[in-house]
Amino acid sequence: MKLKNIRKLAIFMGGVLLLNCAPTQKFTAESPQPGKSLLVGAILVENVGLEDVYEAKTAKINVVIIGKSTENGREVTQAYRVKTNADGYYMIQNVPPGAYVIKGIEVDLGYETRMIISSRWEGNRQQYYPVSLMIDNTVRYWPQASDKRVIDMRIRYFRIDAAKRIVYDDVKSLSNAQLALEDKRYTMPDPEDYFSEKFPDWGWFSAD
């Protein structure tokens, strides 16, 4: 299965500081707070030739997410930093309902490359590009806000070639899918399904 509507992205070198990010790593259940949501997603990265290495990465990828919500009648923007597990999945518990954007990732590729990827917008199109410092928290275009109990960010796929050109897409799930690497096939369930199957007793997935 091939991903459709892959968007090729331009490369831009630069970077600015990331503000107000708190690390989140372990999948430890928290009691759902009234009016809050569980945010879930997954990351898959394919390295297609950087440092002459061809590899797939899912584990220990740092993901920077920016959220916008309304609290007490005021618009609030918050940055989150979370790390994927071995399967490529991440979650953030008790976030306010609102709009959320994957602003960038940090991933180790090849033998010694620490790839920092941020994003910017051309109109309403988000474009990812490598930076030399850190990921900023500027969002020019927000998706539709969600008030669901579980906010599903889907699976974000990145393909990076030897020239550090980035291709990305986002899909709901993968089933025995072949992407850029001919010797790799991927089965990744939808993030909400992944967590509900892995942790069925968590309050986020139990009936009210």
Image (spheres, rainbow, N blue to C red):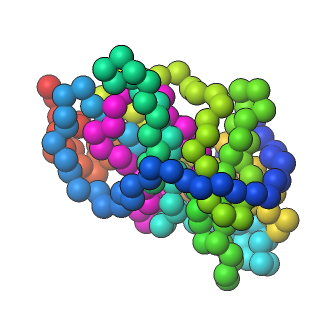
Q: Is residue 95 left or right of residue 124?
A: left
Q: Position of residue 92 (x, y in %)?
A: 35, 46
* Residue 91 in view in this figure: yes
User: Over which residues does the magenta segment extend?
Assistant: 82-104
Q: Quadrant of residue 170?
A: top right
Image quadrant holding the C terminus, namely top left
Residue 80 lies in magenta, yes or no? no
Q: Quadrant of residue 82?
A: bottom left
Please give the name of the residue rendered at 56% of the width and 26% of the height, measured from the top-left corner. Answer: 143
Residue 95 lies in magenta, yes or no? yes
Please give the name of the residue rendered at 60% of the width and 72% of the height, measured from the top-left corner. Answer: 108
Q: Is residue 192 left or right of residue 167?
A: left
Q: Quadrant of residue 50?
A: bottom right
Q: Position of residue 6 (x, y in %)?
A: 75, 41
In the rendered view, tell whether residue 7 sits above or below residue 59. Answer: above
Determine the residue located farthest toward the bottom in the rendered image. 111
Q: Nearer the viewer, residue 85 or 120?
A: 120
Q: Position of residue 107 (x, y in %)?
A: 59, 66
